[in-house]
Amino acid sequence: MDKEMNKYRADFPILAQTVNDEDLVYLDNAATSQKPQTVIDAIVNYYRNDNANVHRGVHTLAERATAQFEAVRQKVARFINAPTSEEIIYTKGTTEALNWVARSYGERFVKAGDEIVISYAEHHSNLVPWQELAKRVGATLKYLDLTADGAVDLAKAEATITAKTAIVAVNQASNVLGVANPLAQLAQLAHQNGAILVVDGAQGAPHMVTDVQKMGADFYAFSGHKLLAPTGIGILWGKGELLAQMAPLEFGGEMIDWVELTQSSYKKAPLKFEGGTQNIEGVIGLGAALDYLEQVGMDKIAAYEQELVAYVLPKLQAIPGLKLYGPKDPKKHTGVISFNLDQIHPHDVATALDMEGIAIRAGHHCAQPLMRYLDVAATARASFYFYNTKQDADRLVEALLLTKEFFGNGTI
Ligand code: PMP
C-alpha cells in the first residue's frame, strides 16, 4: 500500500524539516499526531471569516459559527457510529471525558461495597479517576490480568468481573504495548453482571474503524489531538439513557435552561455538560480532521499501519539485545512499539535517536502500574501513523544499531 498511502505525507507541512541536520522522522504519534494543512487552514479560516460565539447570537457570524460547531457533532457521531449526535459531548480530551464519567455517573451509581474493574495496562487517565471515585464512595478498585501480548485475559476476567462490579473501564488499544482489547466480549461480561463498560479510545479512534455500538460500550472517550485535530478538544460519547440520568459538572452560561434567584433548570445532554464558551476552534479543527480521515479511510489506515508493523517488527527483533514488549505477531499489533535496548536507559536511546532526527518517546508513558507489571522502570516507544513510511522504519532500525554501537551494550 506504500504508493497509495505515502502521498498523504506531503499534506503535513511539519514533516518536511530537518532536525539535527537529518530529515525528521516523527515516531511519537501515540503522544500526539501531526496536523495536515486542511486542519490548519480550517482553524485559520474560522478566525478570518466566521469567528463568533456559538448558540448565543442571531447575527450571521454567530449563525455560521454555530452551524459549523454543531455539524461537527454529527461528523463525530458518524465517525464512531453513535446512534445520535445528541450523545456527543465536547470535552478537553480523553482525560476530562473519563473524569466526567467517574464523577457524574460514578458518584450517582457506584455505591459502597461495589467494585470498579480496570486492567493493569491502563493509562493514568483511565486509572486515577477510578481510584479517586473508589475512595469517595467506598468502592474497591480491582485489576484485570493481561495475556502475554498485554491484552485483557478474558479467561481470567470471568473471575474478576462479578455481580459486585459496577464499572469495567479498559482501553481500546494500549498506549504502551500496541495491542487492542477484546471489547465486545468484555462488554458482554460486564452487562451480564449488571455493570457498564467504559472504553478509553485515545489509542483506538485514531487507528482503527470504531463502532461504539458494535463494541458494546456504554461510554467512549477519545482525544482530537491524536487524530490530526488540535489539542484541547476531545469527545465523550455516552448512551442517551445514561446521560439523561447524569448531573452536569460545571454550572454557568450555555448549559442552563432557566435561572431563578434560588434555583435553576438545565438543558438536556449534550449541552448540559458544556458550560461556558467552548473550544470552538478546536471543534472546527476536529471536524476538518475527521473529514481528512474519512477521505483516507480508517480501514486503509488500519491495514497500512499493520503493513508498516509487519515490516519493522522482524527488523527490530533481529537487533541483538533489543527486548520488545507487547505482541510479537504484527497482526495483533497497532503502530505502537515499546522496547528496551540492552541495558541502555530508554531516555538515552531517545536522546541518541533525536541526534539522528528521529522523535520517539521514553519513560513510563503515564502507565506506572503497567511498568511494574512488566517489571521495567521505563521503555522506549516508537509509534507510527499512516503518514510514516517504510523508510522511516528503516531509519529507526539503522539509528538503533548506531546507538547500540555507541553505547557498547551497556549503560553510560
Ligand atoms: N488514554 C490513553 C491510552 C492515552 O494514550 C492517552 C494519551 N497519552 C490518554 C488516555 C490521555 O489523553 P489526553 O492527554 O489527550 O487527555
Image (tube, rainbow, N blue to C red):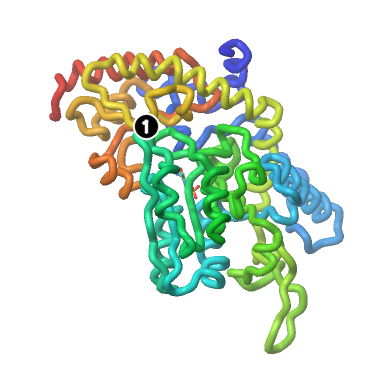
* Mark 1 residue element: loop
Q: Residue furthest top?
A: 3
Dividing the image into 4 quarters, which one contains the C terminus?
Answer: top left
Residue tagged by mark 1? Answer: 326
With 321 as the anchor, is 15 left or right in this view?
A: right
With 58 as the anchor, is 368 left or right in this view?
A: left
Residue 136 falls in image quadrant: bottom left
In front: 87, or 55? 87
Answer whether residue 366 is visible to the viewer in this image.
no
User: For the point 45% across and 28% down, which residue is it?
Assistant: 333
User: Where residue 356 sits: x, y (%)?
Assistant: 33, 20
Q: Amino acid at mark 1?
A: Gly
In front: 253, or 83? 83
User: Where residue 197 sits: x, y (%)?
Assistant: 55, 53
User: Where residue 210 sits: x, y (%)?
Assistant: 62, 38
User: For the point 57% across and 66% down, which residue is it?
Assistant: 105
User: For the point 41% across and 17% down, which residue is it?
Assistant: 312
In front: 179, or 10? 179
Q: Is residue 389 above or below residue 227?
A: above
With 350 as the anchor, is 270 left or right in this view?
A: right
Q: Is residue 186 above or below residue 110?
A: above
Answer whether residue 149 is visible to the viewer in this image.
yes
